[in-house]
Image (tube, grey):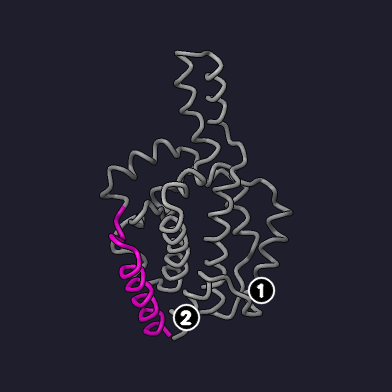
Amino acid sequence: MANSLKQKREKLENFMTQNIKGFEIRSKEDSFLMKFLSYIIFFNKGFMTRFVTTFYPHVYVPKLPWNEDNNLGAIATLAHEWVHLYDRQRLGWFFNFLYLFPQCLFVLGLLGIWNPWFYFFFLFILPFPSPGRAWAEFRGYRMTIAAYYWMTGMRIDVKSVVDHFVNSNYYFMWPFRGWLMRKFQKECVKIQNDVLTAELTIVKNILRN
C-alpha cells in the first residue's frame, strides 16, 4: 500500500510538471514572498506551518522535504492545488481577481486623494463573502474529497471541509454553513456514483491507471 501510494504521488507530480509550465514545489521557509504574505494574512495563524499555498506556477509547502511519511495526505493536497493551477492556467489573471474579490477593491481607496468618495473602497478590506474565492476553493476541496475517496474508499468528514469556508482560514469567504454542507454532500454522492467533472476525471485516471 505504501509503495503504491508513493508511485501515485510520483505520477501526479510528474503530470503536474508536464502540464503546468514552470511547476515546482517550494518551501515557505525559504520564500520571502510567503513570509511577507504571512503578515498580510494575519487572520490565518497556520499559514506558514499548516497550509499549502499555490502561487502560479508554484506550490508552497511549509518546508521541504514535505510529507514524505504521508503520501495519502500529499496526494490529496497536490490534487487540490492542481485544480487551482488548472483554473489559473485556463482563466489567466482573471482567476486571481476572482480569488481576491471583493477584498482587492480596497486598493481603489487610494484614489481618494483625488475624490473622497473613493475612500469608501477601503471598506472592502472587511471580511465580506467572496463568491470567487469560495468557487475556487469549492472546486479544490471537492478534489480533495474525491482523491481521498478513490484511494481509501472512505469519505472525508464534510464538516471539517466546510469549517475552512466559514472560519478565518480563508477570511470567512462563505459563511453559509448549511448551504455548503448540502452542496458538498451532493458532490460526495456524485463522486461515489462516478459522475465526475473534467478535472476530477483527469486526476482519477492518473491515480487509478
Q: Residue at x 57, y 31 (%)?
A: 126
Which numbered disc covers residue 205? 2
Which SS does the magenta portion mostly show?
helix
Q: Are marks 1 and 2 in contact (CB under 8 Å)?
A: no
Q: Which structural element holds mark 2?
A: helix
Q: Is residue 27 above or below residue 128?
A: below
Specify start and end residues of the magenta stretch as a single range.
Answer: 1-27
Kindly report the distance in space between the C-alpha atoms of the residues bearing marks 1 and 2: 17 Å
Among the 4 quarters of the image, the one containing residue 191:
bottom right
**Residue 172 in the figure: left or right of residue 85:** right
Residue 134 location, x and y as percent?
58, 50
Residue situated furthest left in the rendering: 30
Name the residue beneath numbered marker 1.
190
Task: Identify residue type, mark 2.
Answer: Asn
**Does the magenta run of residues contain 193?**
no
Packing grade of label 1 (10 A; few <14, some 14-19, many >=20) is: some
Q: Residue at x 45, y 37 (%)?
A: 42
**Does the magenta run of residues contain 21?**
yes
